[in-house]
Structure formats: structure tokens, C-alpha cells
Image (cartoon, rainbow, N blue to C red):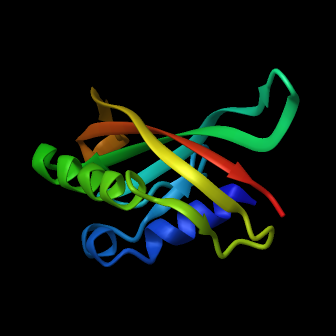
Amino acid sequence: MITDGIITLLKNDATLSALTTQIMPTGAVKLPQPPYIVYHIGTTLDTNTVQGATGYRLARFQFDCYSNLYTEAKKIIKAVRGVLQNFKNTTLSDTDATFVQACLIDFESDMPMVQQGTAGVFFRVMVQVSVWYKES
């Protein structure tokens, strides 16, 4: 599955893993202490041409970084961008052997700060990435 392959790719990056190894899907039951990344896929579409289906899909991932420090949240999102912005023409290590044709950074945005119970206020920075892929 594309999600498993992308998350493994991120977790195996030395720059990103030096900043955080905590990458979890949205809806995680218990969130850890920051910094951490929460991800989800906003939309997934089949791609077509006038000749019909291409066999490729487009998934729009959103990665939200939470941190006690704004500068740390920005560094982590920069590391996520660094992994994905030039990732192309490669087969991921997921169970579907998903082939990624290309990734495109759609945008990055500072988001409203988040109150996390008694832990205080966390800074949140997000990046959206479009990934064109084909599952084997």
C-alpha cells in the first residue's frame, strides 16, 4: 500500500529521523510528546487521458508536524519536503511494490496552534504532497 511505502521512506531518512521518528496516521488513539508528525491522505484519484485509464493514481498526502518550538516544526517539515520533493521513478518497499512516478510539493502552511490538554500549546506546520503512483 502506498501509505506504508511513503512512511517507511520517511522513517528511513537520516535527516528526518534525527528530528523525530514519531510518524502516525490521523486518529491515533494516544499522541506522544512532541515533536511528531501526523499524516493522512486527503484524496486519491485515478488518472486518465483521452485514451482512457493510465494505470496511475494520484494521492494527496498531508503531513502535519507538531512541536513545542516553531523553529523545530519548520525544520521537520523541511526534512519531509527534502525526502519527497525529488522522489520519482522508484519502487517503494511496501507489500504492493508501489512504483512512484513523481512527487510534487503542493504547498506548505503554518496552521493554528493546538492546545494539547495539560501538555500546553503546540506549534503546527503542514505540507501537502501529491504522489503519482502505480501499484503492482
Residue 44, placed above or below residue 7: above
Q: Residue placed at 36% from the left, 40% from the top?
A: 117
Q: Residue placed at 24% from the left, 52% from the top?
A: 78
- Point out residue 18 in the picture as x, y percentages from the top left corner: 26, 75
Q: Residue placed at 53% from the left, 57% from the top?
A: 24
Q: Residue furthest right?
A: 52
- Near-viewer residue (124 or 132): 132
In the displayed structure, does residue 124 sit left or right of residue 13? left
Where, quadrant-wise, is the N terminus in this rendering? bottom right
Q: Residue furthest front?
A: 51
- Point out residue 5 in the picture as x, y percentages from the top left corner: 63, 66
Residue 14, placed above or below residue 136: below
Total marks shown come to 0
The answer to which quarter of the image holds residue 3 is bottom right
In the displayed structure, does residue 102 sit left or right of residue 92? left
Q: Residue placed at 22% from the left, 49% from the top?
A: 73
- Near-viewer residue (86 or 114): 86
- Near-viewer residue (116 or 56): 56
Q: Residue furthest top?
A: 50
Residue 100, placed above or below residue 10: above
